[in-house]
Amino acid sequence: MNLKKKLFLLSVLIFLCKLSGFTQTTVDYTDSRILYEGRVDLTETNGLGVYWPGTSIKSRFIGTGIEAELEIPAGADNYYYIILDNIVQAQKLVVSGSKKYYTLAQGLSNTEHTIELVRLNGFHEGYPRFHTKFHNLKLTGTGTFLPVVQTKTRKIEFYGNSITVGYSNEYHNPNNPAEDHAHSKYENNYLGFAARTARYFNAQYSAIAKGGIGLMVSTTDTKMPLLYNKIDPYDNNRTWDFNNYQPDIVVVNLLNNDASIINNPSGNSYYSSSFPSGPPTDEFIINAYKNFISTLRQKYPNTNIICALGGSSVNPNQNNRWKNYVTSAANQLNDNKIFVHFFEYIGRGGHPKALDNETMANSLICFIKCNNLWDAPANTNQNSTTGIDLPLSSEMIYSKNVQLADNVVMQGFDIDANNNVFYSHIAGKYMVKISKGLPNSTPESLMTLRYFGHSTNMAVEKQANDHYVWIGNYGTKYVDGNYWAEQVVSRIKYAPGATYRNHEAVENYYIGPYKHLNPTIDFENNILAISYSSERPNKNSFVLYKLDEVKSLAISSVTLQQLTYGGSGGDAEVTVSPTIPVRDLRQLTPIAAFDVNLTPLDWQGFDISNGKLYYYEGKGGANNGAPGEAYVTIFDFNGQIVERRTQVQAIASVPALQQQGITSTGYMEAEGIKVRNGHLYLGFASREGDIRAANIFRYQPVIQ
């Protein structure tokens, strides 16, 4: 049956269900309309054990609400993400106590939805973290469950310790970045490097991981060679059938705990029993590693196996001992489907935090691609890889509650290599003010630009000891007094305390008879990009040039279209068609030019980096408790979507914003976007009553 026919029959089924009022409001854990990822055993009776971190439960339904019946041993708790219609919900689900129903979603439109539960924390006998028993899903009203099909064709599996689990990766003490916290609520496998890697490649995901575990010795009485084949990690009588899940790639990230204990065995209760003949020799360690990889090879004869090391405890860049063990074992196995990869050391004690895990994921993703194990997903219109689809966490907050001069809204920003933040903001409608300061601090200086425009986008260039601001100029005065329709881009030296009028900018760049010009620059790749409005309706146009070619053009002159400015600040209002000095970019051949369709939301900026254009749009909310909206879409330089339009979830929860001390009113207006220093930064203007503030959130290092 072809795909069109299947979709038609499914549509008929949905219609008939609605028409007849037919409802099937409960499905138990064995029902085929529930899809699992991770190691689970559907032959279990009296509920399904959810043992391993990252295990997910997914279903599809028509209805207005849904619940899950779950239970957990007394005194324990487990944490889950609820993913509704592919959006991670801000509030985690906490499972504790005897069997009962938990609300997953309510108040939905009576249409088709998807729901997914993802276990975030691992298991550990030293903490109250054990398995969850999943019994069924139940709709809270009329509706029906729909067939669900596994569309992911790729499979990946990880064997690891607390780093793979995601131990303490959501705990953040700004006064002690190395500090960890043992509570389950700070453990998030979804934010770990393993799950991030699986999501990037759109692969099915399985994690066999436990905090404290080693290959030869652990902090508890088990070791990975004794654990790797278990269904339930605490039941030695039930072993996994490896034919159930044959991954394309297996990643083994072990030896961190072995290294820590072997290097300092005092206080470990299991050292002597693990090494009764004394400290292990190099040969002993290499053979132990070889034996485990050989065991996996027996289970997975055709799988690519990546022997990884790093993240914490073991610094493979400085301590070649453990690095050499892995390399020697892999070489001795003489298997062309066994690879070695070392993660960069995080540079401090403690476990990798969420941002560290992003860096690790990028490292592994690049390794997989560079070794041709997998390409990027074939669907170029793929999900976001930047992390903007995740709820707000303290680690995302790069800077918050910065009040700008005149209590006005930030329009755009840029960040230099020294973490100086430059803000653009409008004062008195006719002035653009450029402020400079450090994150979380009141700006230390500002420069004023009169009659330039609205400063939706800007870029700041560092040259020797000076900074230069690239910004739209020669805007025209609208009826409401605001300035828009900038006709050139100007480059002007940042001079604290100075005031410049439009005609005092002597370095101007002209692309033709267009308006609403806004620039950005990818300095690393020598590219200037300018957005503008053209004659094409409902389009935002972009043109890209080599920056060094632009700056080397000879200066000529051009007469601009008629514009009006002045009438404020002591200057008379004039309407003129000024002739100004410019570098005329029409002499150059652009490296790219394309359009992007406008949406009903306000355009709030763009940036470029490594062949991608990051497009930002949103609205602020009504300052009455309703959240704002923001979206990012990523395009290539042909104007094709690389990562689909994705909502920024960090501003979708007003309670989360309030908890972080940003706003209780929900007002968060998207204002500016930058890719700098290996990260994606999103700007937001917040309001708390009449107080306005600038906020910048930082996201995952950008996949190159």
Image: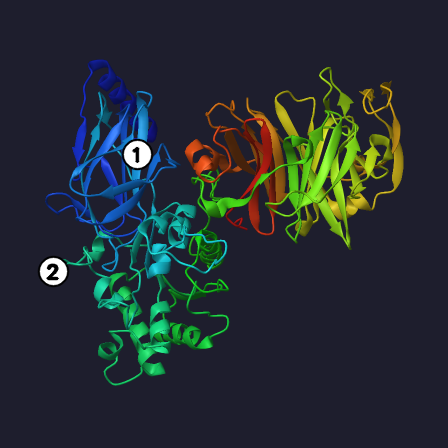
Q: Position of residue 394 (x, y in %)?
A: 47, 45
Q: Residue at x 29, y 51 (%)?
A: 53
Q: Which residue is mark 2?
A: 237
Asked where in the image residue 589 lies, by quadrant, the reply is: top right
Above or below 122: residue 147? above
Q: Quadrant of the N terminus?
A: top left
Residue in the image at 39% along x and 74% along y: 331
x then y, percent, for residue 654: 44, 32
What type is the residue that disc 1 sits on? Answer: Ile
View extreme (bottom): residue: 277
Dot 2: what SS? loop
Residue 88, compared with residue 40, is above or below; it is above
State the separation of the CA atoms marked 2 and 1: 33 Å
Give the colour scheme shown.
rainbow
Is 415 placed above or below 403 here? below
From the top left corner, tell me how far across and down residue 616 is, in percent: 57, 34
147 vs 124, nearest the viewer: 124
Q: Nearer the viewer, residue 482 or 326?
A: 482
Report whether residue 610 is seen. no
Contact (Cβ within 8 Å) of mark 2 with mark 1: no
Which residue is painted at 75% across and 42% down in the image? 469
Is 68 above or below relative to 526? Answer: above
Task: Let me know if residue 322 appears in the view.
Answer: yes
Q: Callout 2, which amino acid?
A: Asn
Q: Earlier in the sequence, mark 2 or mark 1?
A: 1
The residue at 20%/49% (across/down) is 75
Residue 627: image tag:
none
- Which residue is disc 1 drawn over? 115
Question: For this rendering, which residue is in front, 178 or 207?
Answer: 178
Left or right of 388, for residue 135: left
Q: Position of residue 259 (x, y in %)?
A: 37, 73
